[in-house]
Amino acid sequence: MTAPAPTRPLPAVRDPEPVPTLASFGPPRLLAGLDELPRMNRVAHLSRHGSLPQLSSTELVALAEDIDLRGRGGAGFPFARKLTAVMDGMRKADGKGAVVVNGSEGEPSCLKDTALLLRAPHLMLDGALLAADALGAHEIAIGVTRMDVLNSVQRAIDERGPVRPTLRVTLLTERFVTGEGSAMTNGLGGGPGLPSGRKIRSSERGLNGLPTLLSNTETYAQLAVAARLGALGYRTTGLPTEPGTLLLTVAGSRVVEVPYGVSLARVLALCGMDQGQGVLIGGYHGTFVSPTDALTATLSKESLAEYNAVLGAGAVLPLPYDTCPAGETVRVAQWMGAESAGQCGPCVLGLPALAEQLDRAVRGGGTSALEAVQARMRAVEKRGACSHPDGTSRFVASALAAFPEEFERHAQGFGCGRPVTGALPVTGHTPPPIATPLPARAPAPPQERLLVDWTLCRGHGLCADVVPGVVKLGPDGYPEKASMPLPARMRRRAQLAVRRCPALALRVQGGN
């Protein structure tokens, strides 16, 4: 496919929170009109896009199938299958159901849905209303995590006047896991907004226990565009196997609309960037693509699969030459650990322990520290109430594989001399000025440590009684740390704790 020429950048809107600049590669669809107006109100929206057609449930499913519409929030699940599953669920629930729009973006590298909700909120409302009318759902609930987004969406709802089904927007707690399906429906239903930890599909039991169609902002906006264009019109751009356009957040600050099939290199060039030391695709649960691969990769599932990467939520993060890859990885791992929902030991304890061990390795901890990072990753995999531990482990593993020499040099105490610039954005965390070993510090004398194996620990809590002052239990009943300094005077009691542990999860290890 020959990509169309880039269009001119679209203007930014000032706001105290991060607001992306906008651009498009070729004629925009979702961002249409935003080169002239900072925000599309109801009148401007109708002037640009026209009125919304009405579709039956059968017609809506056929449209979603014909354009192969998939969720744009990360998982890429076929939208037609979601619709069919909700229809089946509603038949079993006496025709009752709901539509939920996931408008949260808990990851600082993602701003595409925020851009839509701030600049073109009526496209999302159109798609949600189209789906609700076709299904016969009685409520549309929209979950957001930013006050400016809340105000924009509420303003758009007010501009429409009374509609059926009812529309409501709710401000939820801003955290990484808020966008997880059960966390979103729990929060919108008045609950704590945390993952349920149970494999229950929203199509069976979602908002207030009703069958629920749940998808993210861009998915509903794409549906609204497709309903107006029709399947054939929608397919006039993109690839035959992946038609249409998609939104990307580039470098955590620019939102770009591009057709499927455009090369990654051309998108980066549009944003005045290159591939640098590599490109993180899919955000902080994603995969690093090497500089060489980034020159040949195109934005399609088939192309990215060759590099074991997926678009996910559409985050594209090039790593510039002037930043330290190892330090950037530590910084993100620390942030991800702090974003735990606090529901399970492997996440609330395991992820901070993983970040701590990674930081130790990067600051000159030696080969043994890098090996300990691998052990920490294995300890959290497939053990969480949601996918956050798995995704964090995958991010760290991808960084280690993409920059093996960087991590090895740092572990051996050489470092790279480059600062951590924050090219991988996080919130509420100030980066260290330089990611090199701590200077002018004599190595600490070897000290034994008491270690907890998370794969075995069951939270019995006996260790805290046997080794007081060394083992402290968190509010969940698990040890607060997986690795604890062991004073010589407590060695005999620690050995006793090792023998008494019902799960055999404790061991004493000599210090490095």
Image: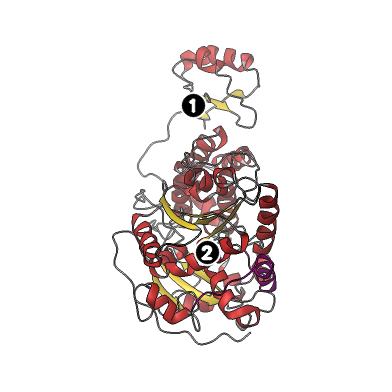
Say whether residue 319 is left or right of residue 64.
left
Tag 2–tag 1 contact (CB < 8 Å): no
Q: Establish if 311 lies above or below 139.
A: below
Tell me if residue 474 can be seen.
yes
Quadrant in the picture for residue 169: bottom left
Of helix, strand and loop, which one carries label 2? helix
Tell me if residue 412 can be seen.
no
Using the image as rendered, state which of residue 20 and residue 391 is in the foreground.
20
Residue occupying the point 58% across, 15% down: 497
Say whether residue 309 is left or right of residue 31.
right
Residue 443, position as x, y percentages in the image: 42, 35
Q: In this figure, which residue is indicated by the disc labeled 2?
A: 129
Say whether residue 89 is left or right of residue 324.
right
Q: Establish if 455 lies above or below 405.
A: above
**Does residue 53 show up magenta in the picture?**
yes
Mark 1 packing: few (<14 Cα in 10 Å), some, or many (20+)? some
Range covered by the magenta-colored residues: 51-70
Circle nearer the N terminus (2, 1): 2
Q: In this figure, which residue is indicated by the disc labeled 1?
A: 484
Q: Amino acid at mark 1?
A: Met
Residue 364, position as x, y percentages in the image: 47, 44
Mark 2 packing: few (<14 Cα in 10 Å), some, or many (20+)? many
